[in-house]
Image (tube, rainbow, N blue to C red):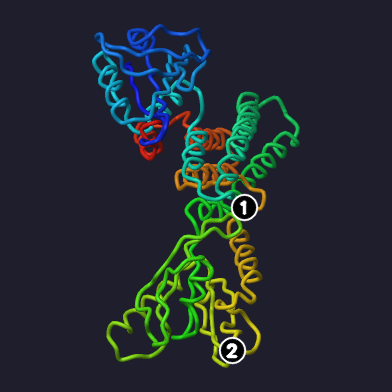
Amino acid sequence: MSTIFGPLTGAGGAVTLVRVSGPEALRIAAALCKLPAPRRASVRRLAHEGRVLDEALVVVFPAPESFTGEDVVEVSLHGGRAVLAAVSAALVALGARPAEGGEFSRRAYANGKFSLLDAEAMADLIAAQTEAQRAQALEGALPGACAAWRERLRLLMAQQEALIDFPDEDLPPAVEAALVAGILLLRDEMEAALTAAPAAERLREGLEFVILGAPNAGKSTLLNALAGEEVAIVAATPGTTRDAVGVRVDLGGVPVHLTDTAGLRETTDEVEAEGVKRARARAARADFLILVAAPGEAFPKAPEGVPHLRVRTKADLGGEGVSARTGAGMDELRAALAAQARALTTTRGAPPLARPRQVACIRDTVAALDAALALHEPELRGEELRAAAGALARLVGAMGVEEVLDAVFAGFCIGK
């Protein structure tokens, strides 16, 4: 196993934290400075081949009590690029190599420091841009639920094996009934998680709210007001917006891509007609629609199955509704949209399956449990329960293959 190093912080800051991990980490670091006692931060002068590299804060974490489970040395350098380049060159000369993306976390996983679910949660936490995303990544509901499911499945398999091993012991019918009831309850809990999965994934990826309406209905002005910046061009000429214009906003802690579209009308203008076509297509695949209409005008029709809210604009011209120009009713509109965003991303108590890999593992587990429930022969049912256990083990990486590990850790930065 090679010894690796990499910066844990972005370039250009006042301090750059560099981690060195692997079997030669202590030897390599000791060649640069006198190492302090474990877990005691000390200032040391780093030098290599008679040249001073930096004055740095050095902390030693002996294996296995470290992030990776290996010997680790973390060095807080001054943040200049030249300092990082000089220390990196010295580390390479002493036998270390630059870490690949996600390699620290992958070694931590291999050394039993956390599961694949923990790794995915860490990646989601790093990428979190809103409070709701942060909370979903940190709540830890899925690892806990998975551990409970695995233990219950283990007990169900043990009960099934008892029925297989002691067929002539005249076990009471209640044993069989309890086994089937336990399988059914476990299956239903996992099915509930699958049902809630789209909401968890929408929160992780972000929602798309599309503003739909006729030309000059106030769509672009409304987009700018909700975004708090001039995103779309606003003009009195109908048909100014020809293509989708969007901005990412935070609504109630939920990331939302807010999209303005071309005004809906019949037109002979080829470019505008294409914009209208794209607007309708965008609306059909949106998570939520904001249907807008100026005073006295009809609201557009929402595509079937797409939730929506009707907003009467230009209240400053008279009548009820909102005015993006004066701000009238905008606070109430933002609150209503935030409520919709939260409703679309709530998992209603089910553990959040936020990634396709997680959904696939639980779906395979449910399929195996369904197959077990459909069988009456103990041996065949036991085989399906083992298949369910295998699918569930893949969720935490207990039976992971290299391709799965590559997919999980590929999105990590070098410092992780």
Up-down relation of residue 344 to residue 263 (above or below): above
* Residue 169 vs residue 19, the one in the foreground: 19
Residue 148 on image: x %, y %: 64, 34
Residue drawn at (48%, 38%) of the image: 120
Q: Nearer the viewer, mark 2 or mark 1?
A: 2
Q: Amino acid at mark 2?
A: Leu
Residue 8: quadrant of the picture: top left
Residue 158 on image: x %, y %: 63, 27
Classify residue 3 as left or right of residue 299: left
C-alpha gap between disc 2 and disc 1: 41 Å
Label 2 close to label 1 by CB (< 8 Å): no
Residue 265 on image: x %, y %: 41, 88
| Mark 2 or mark 1: whose residue is earlier in sequence | 2
Q: Secondary structure at mark 2?
A: helix
Up-down relation of residue 155 to residue 316 (above or below): above
Quarter of the image containing the C terminus? Answer: top left
Residue drawn at (32%, 30%) of the image: 100
- Few, some or many residues within 10 Å of mark 2 (<14, 14–19, 20+): few
Classify residue 113 as left or right of residue 320: left
Up-down relation of residue 27 to residue 129 (above or below): above
Up-down relation of residue 276 to residue 390 (above or below): below
Residue drawn at (40%, 29%) of the image: 16
Q: Amino acid at mark 1?
A: Thr
Q: Secondary structure at mark 1?
A: loop
Residue drawn at (39%, 37%) of the image: 412
Q: Which residue is mark 2?
A: 317
Quarter of the image containing the N terminus? Answer: top left
Residue 116 on image: x %, y %: 48, 33
Residue 30: quadrant of the picture: top left
Residue 347's label in the rendered image is 1
* Residue 337 vs residue 167, the one in the foreground: 337
